[in-house]
Amino acid sequence: MRPRLTAALLLAPLLATACAGTGADTRTMARALPPDTAFTHPGVLVSEAQLEAVKKNVTAGKQPWLKAYLDMRDSKYGAYKYRPEPYASVDCPGGDHADRPAHGCVEEREDAIAAYTQALLFRITGKQQHAVKAREIMDAWSATMRRHTEEDAGLQTGWAGSTWARAAEIVRHSPGAGWPADRVARFETMLRTAYLPTVTRKVPDYNGNWDLVMTDAAIGIAVFLEDRKAFEHALERFRERVPAYFYLAKDGKLPLTPKGSTVNTPQKLTTYWFGQRTYKDGMSQETCRNFKHVGYSVAATAHIAETAWHQGIDLYGEVKDRLKSALAFHARYQAGESAPVWLCGGKVDRNMGPDLEVALNHLENRLGMAVPAAHKLAEETRPAGTDNLFVSWETLTHAGNPGS
């Protein structure tokens, strides 16, 4: 475990965590990882304190964690008989390409979720079979995987890479998991060569969920590899993309654009924002596309900030107002409130997935901020399961679980 307060950390540029309400977190955190401060492990999305809290809640039979655990345990991903299906080349064409069918895309994502599921089951139950299964899945892929191809390679590596990093982090840094050093090294090589170059590729004019989920993978991989350069790159990319994705009135009459974007006129912005011309606090670049993609971006934003938080970096503090506004705005309409004519022509696609828990946990349980519409929506849809892409079991890991 890295020290929380080194001399370098105290001398680093600091950001005071903005707080509201009783019990808000008042720690001061660094803007960047000081050079003499080690990475904290496990520290990709879930911390040691959070894992221990999950085990305690489940063992005590508390809700909603017990139901969340049982759903995870009884899913296909939690089975001892689960068998991985690795591919050397995962080929994911964009759109509908009957002439170029996908190869290995679903298999890769589901195997990564299975490895993460088995890793969580090992931490909760202590049963060695779960650690063995998680290792088996990761070893099968690291022995086989070489590349990703086709138009959706960035999205695919973001989805799978973020989950692989979570699974690998838990198994590597859990006593008794028994992952041999040579297999760990081989998995590191796979992440470094078949994922990291793709998830760090610049895509400023793509829909924002791409950049965000790719950064989710990049920061998780960076922590697992203890790659400081990749970690700092992920922080920079987060700071560029999140303000350009979630709008606040303080941005001006028009939304911000990410660095390097060619979306630089009001007309181009309208097209990029799926026909939207009126901008209100909490709207996102993909609100008028559908809430599913907004949910992906909410989840990815929170995942990145949560991983950074475990490393002593308060990205949340830089975007908490945007995140709170986005949750409040979309939760109202997701719950059924009629959309006004100025919003997406009065029609919104209410298909958000299990994407609220990590952001809500920080806002409510660390900062003491009230987000009633999102809180109500989360409670009504718990336990959050998996979207079968890159969000899995977050009621179990993050509901009411601020950790340290």
Image: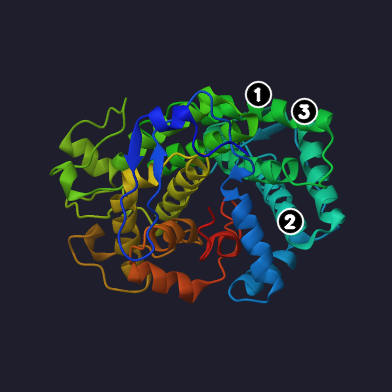
Which type of secondary structure does the marked residue at label 2 adopt? helix
Which amino acid type is marked by label 3?
Answer: Arg
Determine which of the numbered discs, if any, sits on residue 186 in the image.
Answer: 3
Q: Which residue is mark 1?
A: 193
Mark 2 nearby-residue class (10 Å; few <14, some 14–19, many ≥20)? many
Which amino acid type is marked by label 1?
Answer: Thr
Q: Nearer the viewer, residue 314 or 267?
A: 314
Earlier along the polypeptide chain: callout 1 or callout 2? 2
Q: Toward which corner of the image does residue 19 lie, by quadrant?
A: bottom left
Q: Position of residue 190 (x, y in %)?
A: 70, 28
Q: Residue at x 48, y 61 (%)?
A: 357
Horizontal side of 404 relative to 287 (left or right) equals right
Disc 3 and disc 2: Cα gap in Å?
Answer: 23 Å
Asked if disc 1 and disc 3 are in contact, CB closer than 8 Å, the reply is: no
Which type of secondary structure does the marked residue at label 1 adopt? helix
Mark 3 nearby-residue class (10 Å; few <14, some 14–19, many ≥20)? some
